[in-house]
Amino acid sequence: MIPIGELIGTWIAVGLTLMMFSFIYRDNPAFKFGEHLYLGISVGYYVNIQYWNVIYPLVIQAMKQQHNYWVLIPTVLGIFILLRVVPSLGWLSRMAFALYIGGFAGYSIPYIVHSLLLPQLSQTLQPYSGGFGPVVNQVIILVAVFSTLVYFFFSLEHRKTVGAISRLGIVFIMVSFGASFGYTVMGRISLLIGRFQFILESFAEGGRARFW
Amino acid sequence: MIFLKRQFPIIIAFVAGIMLWIRYYIPSETSNSIEEGYLNWVRIIVGFAAILGILSLLQHHLIKIRLKRPGFAFSYVTIAAFILMMLAGLAPFAIPGFAEKNMESGSLFNWLYEFTFIPMQATMFSVLAFFIASAAFRAFRARSMEATLLLLAALIMMVGRVPIGDLISNATPTFQLFGNDYHVIDLEEWTSWLLNVPNAAAKRGILLGVYLSQIAIAIRIIFGIERTYMGGGD
Amino acid sequence: MDFVTLILNLDRKIIFAFVAVLVAWPLIWPLALPIETTPEVRSIFAAIEALPNGSDIIIAADYDPSSKPELQPFTYSLLAHCFEKDLKVHLLTLWPGGPALIQQAIEDVAAQYNKTSGTDYCFLGYKPGNAAVVGGLTNSITGTYPTDFYNKQTATMPLYQRVQSVKDVKYIVDIAAGATVEVWIAFASAPEKVPMSAACTAVSAAGYYAYYTAGQLDGISGGMKGSAEYDVLLMNNYPTVKVGGATRIAGNAVKGMDAQSAVHLFIVLSIILANICYFIANKRQRDERRGA
């Protein structure tokens, strides 16, 4: 026996799924209703998530249990951010953004250099080894990385040699975009499969929408 | 006042940026505490920033209702759903009919998440499948060399990464090269090469450019050249 | 109207109908096409398999319901794999839409394997700020997450008497719907030298090959196909994993692969057909102009 809450819930979920699908035919009141319901539910959801995962443990419990009153500083800065909705006090949010964005700019530079930029560069210029096939691939990679970089380098006019290299760059970029596009189609279809699976399984033998 | 509004934020950004940059190169207890303290503060600040987005969205719908703009009736749905979901999670007791309170499994909040939030969000994104299929059919043409390359790579990827691609490849005849057996069409092998060699290399070229520009922007922010985060006004 | 003009002016609703039928048909009447695994996914499985029993792993489930069909099956399979090997799982998310979804996965799988929160695993929940969270974990896990998702103190849990920070875990897997893989590489995996893999949505998979080929990722699982491959590997290596009924742990992504194949084949053939018609129409136009 399926619990009544799950049974009703599954019917509602199937109904909402069909409501959202109705957009394929054209924009209509059923879809509009679903869209606005989704907006309200999601906003209420995010308030809860931010409260129970951030404000409650990091501010309220930190003060109550660990007597850590330093958290009042970011809390005040956080409230400054909320004051953006009041035009005359909006400037206060700059303090919070300056600390967050300025601090993060400095914090991230060494990580970008040491964890991303240098490893990616050094992997492009490895000693050639592993037989004919891998060496050919390594050469292609080197040429492709260099020509792609040249394509995006706008300080030089793309004529003669530079133009030829950048045209080679576009070849690799297009192949790469093609691969991404192929994968994108796959992703979108998977999401659709997921919804169809949900509807079909809800009504299949043992499904949660079956009361018969 | 002008100092507080204009120069002070730039000073904060400069001091915070330089401190957190240098701390990486001076490993010590102090630099660890600076990092830990800063990151903890950021998590709290970002939490509030997320609520800002929520507030402006609600403001938009309240204005729509007040001015009776076209479709304002739907805004009531948004506001009602928001209040319901918010109370479901924040109420300090279990809502009648549900075993648990707040965000626990068995609560109204969890029920609403599972049976409204998940289906609506998932369906909204899945609808794109129809449009991407029709767009591919109507607009994907081998008009130029670049478009042809993009098209070929996409076609190989689409067949090569799903089970049907393996069936097609295995059905084609084999030939020998350097003592190894190869299929005339080996979509799995082709996609693998496509992804690991030209695709990875082009992506790496783009990424190197992205990293360099991220570093440049970070330096501009620290030294107060880039100030877009301050927003408009005086 | 001849065939070429008909194809070039085809109503998009006909394409929609084809897509809908080709998705539904194989789901109702499965074709059971065999799923071959790729080296990218096999290396994730091998990396987890190579971890000593009882070691610690961070699983970051950074996605929300919009990518549920692609990534939720992977989370189920990976959690089952970890529990089969008795790994201690530190589960968290950087996506605000994720916690309740991941809660379902961990509660389902932990119940199947009789695992206890705080001893065998910990669902830490969500914290905002991406790099501010990942960077924080390299200093202290309990400092970044003073409480778990259920608001229980983490510092007193048996799990965190051994594990202080990312340095103490043996592996990281990011199940990502967005750009969090870079964050994990930059702020945790590379600086702390903890190996990692990524399971991402198909949309972002191609982009991560730059990290895979550079050795910064052990493996990549792209979209529902990657999840299906992991399902297959898990089911082949651990035949006791639940694959049927309502309590199914693995096999969800596998069931979608027939529909995926059918729709892909349709899209590829339709693009080829549309291009042939496009060239014929172009040639006709040229001939007409020449004739005129």
Image (spheres, helix red, strand yellow):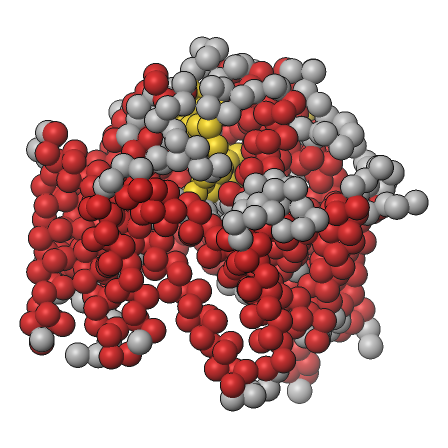
Instruction: Count how many numbered circles sit on residues in the image.
Output: 0
Q: Which quadrant would residue B25 be assigned to in this image?
A: top left
The answer to whether A132 is drawn above or below residue C136 in the figure is above
Q: Is residue B193 left or right of residue A110?
A: right
Q: What's the residue at 60%, 75% (across, down)?
A: B76
Q: Is residue B175 left or right of residue B34?
A: right
In percent of width and height, residue A84 lies at 30, 71
Quadrant in which the C terminus of chain C is drawn:
bottom right
Q: Is residue C12 visible?
A: no
Quadrant in which the N terminus of chain C is drawn:
bottom right
Name, please, the residue furthest toward the top: C52
Q: Is residue A168 left or right of residue C248?
A: left
The answer to whether A132 is drawn above or below residue C150 in the figure is above
Nearest the viewer among A196 and A122 is: A196
In percent of width and height, residue C158 lies at 41, 18
Q: What's the residue at 52%, 14% (across, down)?
A: C86
In percent of width and height, residue A165 lies at 30, 52
The answer to whether B210 is drawn above or below residue C33 in the figure is below
Nearest the viewer among C55 and C34 is: C55
Q: Is residue C105 visible?
A: yes
Nearest the viewer among C71 and C268 is: C71
Q: What's the residue at 26%, 73% (across, down)?
A: A90
In percent of width and height, residue C147 lies at 39, 35
Q: Which quadrant would residue A128 be assigned to in this image?
A: top left
Q: What's the residue at 59%, 61% (across, down)?
A: B84
Nearest the viewer among B19 and C285 is: B19
